[in-house]
Image (cartoon, grey):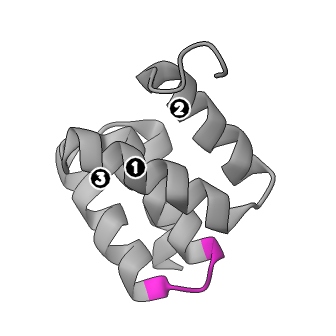
Amino acid sequence: LDQNPRNLSVQLLLADSLLAAGDWRRSIAVLEGLRTRLGNHDAAVLSGLAWAYDGAGRHERALNFGRAAHALAPTDPRVNAIYGRVLL
């Protein structure tokens, strides 16, 4: 991360580790930065945002991102798991 902070793969790994730790604020910041760069075309970013916003208590925003991720990748197990969790 120090050598190439704009590397997409590294940013996604960072976001995943922040999500796993329950650091919603920082994971949202990283993922929103990725969404700014990539647009709304990456299911991994959008599902990560769904998870993060749900964890942060912003359920409607989480639903919107979960729905968008599912529309992009309806057969992706991770997208489905996160969307299912947000729907509960």
Q: Nearer the viewer, mark 2 or mark 3?
A: 2
Does 8 sit above or below residue 46?
A: above
Dominant secondary-structure state across the stretch colored magenta: loop
Instruction: Return the x and y of residue 4 as percentages of the image width and height.
Output: 53, 16
Instruction: Return the x and y of residue 75 as percentages of the image width and height.
Output: 30, 38
Residues at marks 1 and 3 touching, judged by CB atoms closer than 8 Å: no
Verify whether residue 11 appears in magenta.
no
Residue picked out by circle 2: 11
Kindly identify the residue that appears in the image at 64 percent across and 58 percent down. 26
Q: Amino acid at mark 1?
A: Gly
Labels 1 and 2: the sequence-earlier one? 2
Residue picked out by circle 3: 69
Work out whether residue 42 or residue 11 is closer to the camera in this orientation and state it: 11
Kindly identify the residue that appears in the image at 40 percent across and 49 percent down. 33
Kindly identify the residue that appears in the image at 54 percent across and 26 percent down. 5
Residue range in magenta is: 55-59
Residue picked out by circle 1: 33
